[in-house]
Amino acid sequence: MSFTHTPTGRVAATGPMTDAEHRTRTDLAAAYRLVALNGWDDLIYTHISANVPGEPGHFLINPFGFSFDEVCASNLVKIDIAGQIVGTSEHTVNVTGFALHAAVHAARADAFCVMHLHNSAGIAVSIQRAGLLPASQHALRFHGQLAYHDYESVAFTPAEGERLVAHLADKPAMLLRNHGTLTVGRTVAEAYVLMATLVKACEIQLLAQARAPEHADLVLPSEAVAARTAEQLFDGGAIEGALEWPALLRKLDRLDPSFRD
């Protein structure tokens, strides 16, 4: 199955498209809708990108200028690693915004999906010198597994890309200081569930700090408990999101199934 654009931005199936690409388009569109539903979007900015199965070097990304609740399977745009459109599309993409994603996709073989958001809680915690504290079970998922990258400017350069991926290394998530959050998933579902866990961890920390401004007033687990819990939550490296994702898709289907269009 493949799609052709219509004046409304909706599309019709017209030709060959692999089942794998169609599933990826559906999952990626769902991730955009869920981000919007949770209020993690930022007008038309930030992106979630995913590899096109069977097409090395090709990716899917949102059409620039669309809000996240307008994204559907068919209006996602196929691009190459330079952010240039593959084939034809009536939509444009944010090439500058994709540069961060391109650096991660190129550096990480496991980076099937890269999610970068400007959610308020994540930015607020990124500003704190100590970063994410081991203050909740959600936060402990990232104990020893959370990277940090200092803010450099709005313009994302190839040199910064090298520094960012060096800081990210093999970790599944990152706080970009003064900027936002980033997760890497072997599936769209994994990138989304990791982001949901990270955002909730940041929200819990901010709530606790609002009531206990001094860190000494916070009860934190010991290093041994934190390390053991992190290992348990890592679960041997199992791909996360497999159980949660079908339930999230059913939720979207009840609310508005147009993400599948």
Image: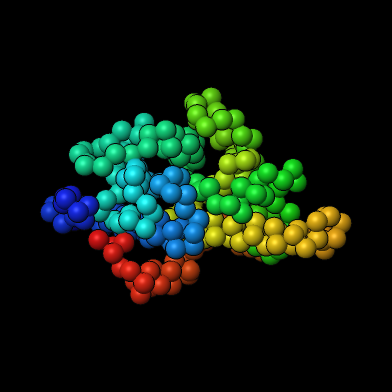
Determine whether 38 is above or below 88 in the image. below
- In x, y percent, where is residue 202? 65, 56
Q: Position of residue 127 (x, y in %)?
A: 68, 44
Residue 176 left/right relative to 82: right
**Of the pair 59 and 257, the residue shown nearer to us:** 257
Residue 21 as seen in the image, left or right of residue 197:
left
In the picture as drawn, the residue positioned furthest to the top comes out as 159
Foreground: 198 or 53?
198
Let me know if residue 77 appears in the view: yes
**Residue placed at 43% from the left, 49% from the top?**
43
Task: Write the residue at 69% across / 58% down.
Answer: 206
Quadrant of the rendering where the C terminus is positioned: bottom left
Residue, x 31% and y 61% (percent of image)? Answer: 259
Residue 102 position by quadrant: top left
Residue at 57% x, 45% y: name it: 180
From what the image shows, is residue 70 above or below residue 148? below
Locate the N terminus by quadrant. Answer: bottom left
Furthest-bottom residue in view? Answer: 254
81 in relation to 77, above or below: above
Coloring scheme of the render? Answer: rainbow
